[in-house]
Amino acid sequence: MTTFDTARTYSLNDLGKTDFGGTPLAVLGHPVKHSVSPAMHNAALAKMQQANSRFRNWTYFRFDVAPEDLPEALPLFHKHNFLGLNLTIPHKVQALDLIKGILPDAERMGAVNTLVWDEFGYDGFNTDGYGLKAGLAQDLAVSLKNTTVVLLGSGGAARAAAVQCVLDGCEKLYIGNRTPERLQSVMDVVDAMPGGGVAEAFAIKEFPDGLPEEGIVINATSLGLKEGDLAPMDVSLLPKGWKVYDMIYNPSQTTLLKEAEAHGLATANGLSMLVHQGARSLEIWSHAEVSSHAMMTAALHALDLPPRYD
């Protein structure tokens, strides 16, 4: 079996010069050097290769592709037989206009993060919603069904989360953001869905009152990525039975999570979402069982974090 340099960040120029093996997969982003996806996916593939020789030539790579180059890039990856692609920032929305087919849930979410090769082009999926609900279940023992959710943000991640909350039958969905126009764009999507009437918009400075004793806050804003970022909300407004999930996983402890823990609330970061959306992508490509445990272990190691699960 050929050994490839999966720690390297490749460019489009490498596509014509490098043989990427039998069944190549890749994540495309800009920047993408920080991505732990190659470590996660190749760890899972190593386990799959032990169980089934069909996967012995499957390898996952990382490519830095500028947004202006994406229209040229996707046909090139298709030509070079990349079976599957993950898309991260800033490509998830732009790719909608560049691919052949889009699954309905991905269309509602307004973004694709998983592309699958077929004869005529790539089909688009979105596994972020799945990753979120699996992460909530694993880390916080929370199901979105019949749960009250306060969702912070109105970007692509928030839109995927809002769609998943409605699909899973949440009891009530409060969506808050600082920009009314962007918030309305998410509300328009949710309102058009069966069951979308559970959603209600709010201004971040006017936090919903009368919350039940239990529920979940999901942070889908970027507040917390930078050192010194303030929390996107005042956690003292939450009843003691609430839980807080921050989609940000690096840093592993955002200001929001620190303040929530100090307030006595159960918390988790978004690493589990990253792992489970990645595992779902690999399942779609391989039609086989994927070890999310192997992916989590590899992600923690790549981020230089201690083991999280036994």
Image (tube, helix red, strand yellow):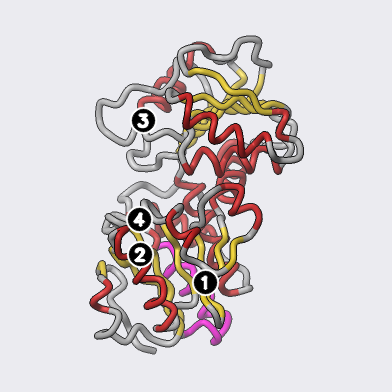
- The residue beneath circle 4 is 301
Q: Nearer the viewer, residue 264 or 60?
A: 60
Q: Nearer the viewer, residue 198 or 253?
A: 198
Distance of label 3 from label 4 (alpha carbons): 25 Å
How crowded pointer 4 is (Cα within 10 Å; few <14, some 14-19, many 20+) is rated as some
Q: Amino acid at mark 4?
A: His
Q: Is residue 103 left or right of residue 96?
A: right
Disc sitting over residue 290 in the figure: none
Q: Amino acid at mark 1?
A: Tyr
Does dot 1 land on a helix, a strand or a loop? strand
Q: Amino acid at mark 2?
A: Leu
How crowded pointer 1 is (Cα within 10 Å; few <14, some 14-19, many 20+) is rated as many
Q: State the image coordinates of residue 37 (x, y, percent, origin top left).
A: 40, 60
Does dot 4 land on a helix, a strand or a loop? helix
Are the two marked residues, 3 and 4, in contact with CB atoms closer than 8 angstroms?
Answer: no
Disc sitting over residue 70 in the figure: 2
- The quadrant of the rendering that contains the N terminus is bottom left
Q: Is residue 147 left or right of residue 293?
A: right
Above or below, comparing residue 122 to residue 91 in the picture: below
Q: State the image coordinates of residue 135 (x, y, percent, origin top left).
A: 56, 45
Does dot 2 land on a helix, a strand or a loop? helix
Are the two marked residues, 4 and 2, in contact with CB atoms closer than 8 angstroms?
Answer: no
Highlighted magenta segment, given as a residue range: 39-56
Q: Residue at x 69, y 39 (%)?
A: 192
Distance of label 4 from label 2 (alpha carbons): 30 Å
Does dot 3 land on a helix, a strand or a loop? loop
Q: Residue at x 28, y 60 (%)?
A: 66
Q: State the image coordinates of residue 163 (x, y, percent, origin top left).
A: 63, 42
Disc sitting over residue 223 in the figure: 3
- The residue beneath circle 1 is 122
| Among numbered discs 3 and 2, the one appearing first in the sequence | 2
Distance of label 3 from label 2 (alpha carbons): 27 Å
